[in-house]
């Protein structure tokens, strides 16, 4: 709908496409990153029985703004033996990869960057750019810690992509669509129509599916947590052993790009999980716009619910970060290959059989 | 010139230039990273041709799988990054004949193939059609390919265990 609006305004589908595609960056990712960094520090503070940032603004509300201004002013340091070309491209590539994922995420029923049929597979595909960018950053830094962090990160993302894809496959098989927009639309009305409660069709299969859907949700949540390199799977950045992994050598705005990409990724995976299992942008209790008969209110409400669900899962990610200790490398690989992948396979089969009968 | 033509030339130029650098670059890690842009350009051309599924699979398999594996191999192999790769020319005569023949075959294929020309239209999603074809008409080939991949996987695992 927003795309059509711009299309009418400018009379060119290319310009309209560009503007519609840059909307999530300007009005969503940047403000979200600002808030999420503050939230992370506040959550961390309160979980450790301290207050977190308090000095800048009311209860430290402007802390991240001050941090961004500081980062903008910082000198951009490139060490002599860095591979300058790759060193400069890497942060752009990492951010481009995580930003590209936002193109296929439906924010409301009125706005999606690109309503492509292969939405969810497209998102998985562009994640590959992030891995390549991380490897590039680690190698170009010419630093042992960076290279180790990058290798760990790539190995981890590649291993945990398999359970993620298996769960996505389960959902694709169950709903018969790979388009995230259609997927969200199917889960309309009240919350028991969400996929985690067995989808919108009321039958015996719906009740049989609930436990397996919950298993699928847990698997995809754990593996996406690993894919965005969050604790307990943050060995690529493990502060106490690797300084800070693949972005040790970066300073100033290039470091900020990595940071932005990390927070954008956190929201992207949360949004995907909520679109797959928790009805995407749909409200759990019906819409105020329908009751009052105001049509334009519905997309606004949907945007609110979409953001709410996304931020809730981001909050759970932060919560886990300050609750669980870090895994060792071998434990990490064991968790993926020996537990998550077999369980995901069996789950895929069971959901398939239940869907058939 | 249509704006879609412009986008096509952009992707084509990206593919060709990065492919050229892949071949001529002396640093093997740089070559591997240039390959990323080549794959990306090819995926873009697939999208413009209306082959959305092939484009996505191109990205998943080549960028997400093969390129990462390649980079891993290059980075884990000790000191390969410092080895000078020879990019000089030897055996100019036979090389010219070989390349000339290959170029002739390609050119003949381009000029004489019965290309299916159709007016530019809104491309439809190919995923469902492809799935139906794979599961009905070409199911034997599809299953055979699966078995071949499985054999390769088992072979790799047994070599790695030695």
Image: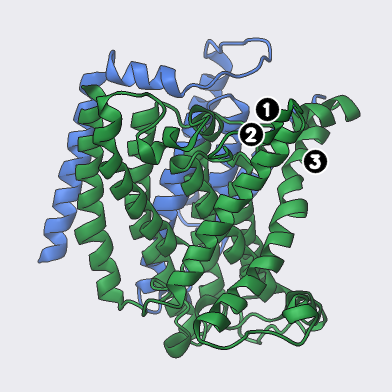
Chain colours: A green, B blue
* Quarter occupied by the C terminus of chain B: bottom left
| Rendered location of residue A27, percent (x, y) | 77, 52
- Return the chain for callout 1: A
Residue A129 occupies quadrant: bottom right
Measure how far apart labels 1 and 3 are at the Cα level: 30 Å
Q: Chain of mark 3?
A: A
Q: CA distance from mark 2 to mark 1?
A: 5 Å
Q: Is residue A114 above or below residue A64?
A: above
Query: Which of the numbered marks, if any, corresponds to residue A287?
Result: 2
Task: Tell us which disc is closer to us: 1 or 3.
Answer: 1
Residue drawn at 73 percent across, 60 percent down: A30
Q: Position of residue B152 (x, y in %)?
A: 19, 46
Near mark 3 (Cα within 10 A), the count class, few <14, some 14-19 or many ≥20, is: some
Say if mark 2 contacts mark 1, CB within 8 Å: yes
Asked if B78 appears above or below A184 in the picture, the reply is below
Helix, strand or loop for disc 2: loop
- The residue shown at (62%, 31%) is A115
- In percent of the image, x 66 and y 69: which residue is there? A85
Query: In this rendering, does residue B20 appear at all?
Result: no
Q: Residues at marks 2 and 1, common chain?
A: yes
- Mark 1 and mark 3 lie on one chain; the one further toward the N terminus is 3
Query: Going 61% across and 81% down the picture, which residue do you hit?
Result: A82
Q: What numbered label is drawn on residue A19?
A: 3
- Residue A154 as seen in the image, left or right of residue A314: left
């Amino acid at each position: 709908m927003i795309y059509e609006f711009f299309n009418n305004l400018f009379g060119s589908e290319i310009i309209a496409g560009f503007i519609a595609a840059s909307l999530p960056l300007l009005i969503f990712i940047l403000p979200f990153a600002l808030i999420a960094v503050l939230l992370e520090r506040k959550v961390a503070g309160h979980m450790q029985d301290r207050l977190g940032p308090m000095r800048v603004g009311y209860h430290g509300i402007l802390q991240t703004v001050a941090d961004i201004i500081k980062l903008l002013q910082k000198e951009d340091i490139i060490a002599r033996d860095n591979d300058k070309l790759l060193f400069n491209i890497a942060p752009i590539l990492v951010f481009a990869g995580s930003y590209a994922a936002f193109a296929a995420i439906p924010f409301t029923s009125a706005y999606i960057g690109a309503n492509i049929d292969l939405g969810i597979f497209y998102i998985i595909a562009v994640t590959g750019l992030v891995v390549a960018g991380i490897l590039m950053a680690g190698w170009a830094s010419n630093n042992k810690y960076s290279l180790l962090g990058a290798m760990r990160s790539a190995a981890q993302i590649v291993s945990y992509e398999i359970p993620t894809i298996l769960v996505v496959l389960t959902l694709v098989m169950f709903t018969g669509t790979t388009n995230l927009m259609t997927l969200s639309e199917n889960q309309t009305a009240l919350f028991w129509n969400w996929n985690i409660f067995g989808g919108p069709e009321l039958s015996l299969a719906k009740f049989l599916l609930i436990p397996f859907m919950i298993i699928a949700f847990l698997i995809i949540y754990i593996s996406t947590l690993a894919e965005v390199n969050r604790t307990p799977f943050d060995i690529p950045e493990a502060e106490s052993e690797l300084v800070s992994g693949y972005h040790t050598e970066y300073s100033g705005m290039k470091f900020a790009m990595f940071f932005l990409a990390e927070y954008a990724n956190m929201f992207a995976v949360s949004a995907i999980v909520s679109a797959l299992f928790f009805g995407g942008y749909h409200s759990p209790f019906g819409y105020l716009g329908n009751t009052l008969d105001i049509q334009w209110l519905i997309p606004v409400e949907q945007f609110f619910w979409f953001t709410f669900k996304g931020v809730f899962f981001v909050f759970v990610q932060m919560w886990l970060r300050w609750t669980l200790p870090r895994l060792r490398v071998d434990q990490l690989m064991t968790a993926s290959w020996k537990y998550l992948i077999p369980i995901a396979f069996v789950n895929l089969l069971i959901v398939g059989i239940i869907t058939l009968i | 010139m249509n704006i879609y033509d412009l986008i096509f030339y952009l992707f084509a130029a990206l593919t060709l230039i990065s492919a050229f650098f892949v071949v001529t670059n002396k640093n093997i890690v740089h070559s591997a990273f240039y390959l990323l842009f080549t794959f990306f350009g090819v995926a873009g051309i697939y999208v413009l041709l209306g082959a959305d599924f092939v484009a996505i699979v191109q990205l998943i398999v080549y960028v997400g799988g093969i390129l990462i594996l390649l980079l891993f191999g290059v980075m884990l192999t000790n000191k390969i990054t410092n080895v000078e790769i020879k990019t000089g020319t030897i055996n100019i005569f036979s090389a010219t004949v070989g390349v000339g023949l290959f170029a002739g075959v390609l050119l003949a294929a381009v000029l004489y193939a019965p290309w299916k020309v159709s007016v530019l239209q809104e491309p439809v999603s190919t995923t469902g059609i492809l799935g139906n074809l794979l599961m009905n008409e070409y199911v034997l080939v599809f299953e055979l390919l699966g078995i071949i991949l499985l054999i390769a996987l088992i072979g790799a695992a047994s070599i790695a265990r030695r």
